[in-house]
Image (spheres, rainbow, N blue to C red):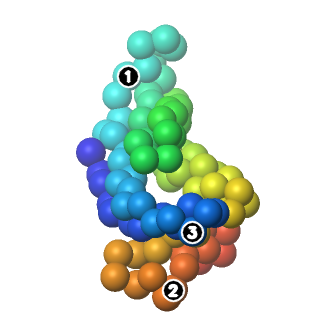
Amino acid sequence: MITSQYVAKHPDGNYIDITIEIALPEPDPEMGGDSRCKVSIAALEIEQYAFGVDDIQAYCLSSKLLQLKLVEKQNQGWQFYFPGYLDQPLDFNQDFF
């Protein structure tokens, strides 16, 4: 599993620590031969799979899925930061992916 720590600022101004997790690729039990990676951010109630025809595609698409979910939260008014750098919000639409 790949993990990374961030700080999220709720639109109401409260800060929370979040952990982004991307699981290693695994066979998709629902589809013959395809792979999937789980993307989760428990503190934001995000848990979803990215699917691919093989492990590499599933992993690459998990990064895109993560970007889509974080941009969706940004559009709802959330802001994200590296821990210790609360004066420099990240822009997942522009800078990160």
Name the mark nearer the viewer: 3 or 2. 3
Q: Is residue 72 left or right of residue 3?
A: right
In whole angstroms, how far apart are the C-alphas of marks 3 and 1?
A: 40 Å
Q: Quadrant of the N terminus?
A: top left
The kind of residue on which mark 3 rests is Gly
> Of label 3 and label 1, which has the lower sequence position?
3
Identify residue for label 3.
Answer: 13
Mark sitting earlier along the chain (3/2): 3
User: What secondary structure is found at the residue carrying circle 3?
Assistant: loop
Measured along the vertical axis of the image, is residue 62 above or below residue 37? below
Q: Residue 60 at x, y = what percent?
A: 49, 49
- Provide the secondary structure element on which disc 2 rests: loop
The residues bearing labels 3 and 2 have C-alpha atoms spaced at a distance of 15 Å
Residue type at mark 1: give it. Pro
**Disc 2: which residue:** 88
Residue situated in front as seen by the camera: 31 or 83: 83
59, above or below 35, in the image? below
Which image quadrant for residue 36?
A: top left
Q: Write the residue at 67% across / 68% down.
A: 93
The one of 96 and 12 positioned closer to us in this rendering: 12
In the picture, the disc for residue 87 is none
Residue assigned mark 1: 27
Q: Nearer the viewer, mark 3 or mark 1?
A: 3
Query: Looking at this rendering, what residue extends furthest in the right direction?
Result: 75
